[in-house]
């Protein structure tokens, strides 16, 4: 009888593929949104399916207080990507802002 086990990629290959997909998503978001001058980082968190995720844009905000600048999430999107890693939809829509 044929075995019902699934063939899985080694963890290191999955991690590399995941990082590559996250990098592709970051590039596409920046291309659509524009790059703010005070960009701190862009975090991409993929959900279990690997084809949906959350993208948060962190910016350094000049805060007029004794603690100095603050880093805040200024933009956030849920994205859905194709098997090729292309963003096919987002909520909200990613429009040029910067």
Image: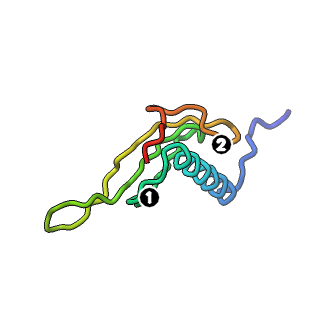
User: How many tags in the picture?
Assistant: 2
Image position, residue 49 (x, y; %)? 58, 38
Q: Dot 2 surroundings within 10 Å: few (below 14), some, or many (20 or more)?
A: some
Q: Are marks 1 and 2 in contact (CB under 8 Å)?
A: no
Q: Identify the secondary structure beneath mark 2.
A: loop
Q: Quadrant of residue 82?
A: top right
Task: Locate residue 17 relative to residue 37 in the image: left or right.
Answer: right
Find residue 38 and report its horizontal and vertical position in percent.
Answer: 38, 60
- Residue found 41% across the figure and 59% down from its top: 37
| Figure quadrant of the N terminus | top right
**Height in image: 48 above or below 61?**
above
Q: Earlier in the sequence, mark 1 or mark 2?
A: 1
Q: Position of residue 88 (x, y in %)?
A: 60, 33
Considering every residue shown, the one lying at the far right of the view is: 1
Q: Nearer the viewer, residue 18 or 78?
A: 78
Q: Quadrant of residue 12?
A: bottom right
Residue visible at 21% across and 67% down in the picture: 68
Distance from the alpha carbon under mark 1 to that under mark 2: 20 Å
Packing grade of label 1 (10 A; few <14, some 14-19, many >=20) is some
Determine which of the numbered discs, if any, sits on residue 14 in the image.
none
Q: Which mark is residue 41?
A: 1
| Front residue of this view, candidates 36 and 42 | 36
The residue identified by callout 2 is: 85
Q: Is residue 73 left or right of residue 16?
A: left
> Mark 1 falls on what kind of element?
strand
Q: How is the image coloured?
A: rainbow
């Amino acid at each position: 009888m044929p075995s019902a086990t699934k063939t899985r990629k080694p963890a290191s290959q999955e991690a590399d593929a995941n990082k590559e997909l996250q990098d592709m998503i970051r590039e596409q978001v920046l291309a659509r949104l524009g790059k703010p001058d005070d960009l701190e980082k862009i975090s991409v968190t993929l959900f279990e399916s690997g084809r949906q995720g959350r993208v948060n844009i962190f910016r350094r905000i000049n805060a007029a207080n004794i603690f100095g600048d603050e880093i805040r999430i200024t933009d956030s999107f849920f994205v859905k990507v194709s098997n090729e890693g292309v963003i096919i939809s987002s909520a909200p829509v990613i429009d040029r802002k910067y």
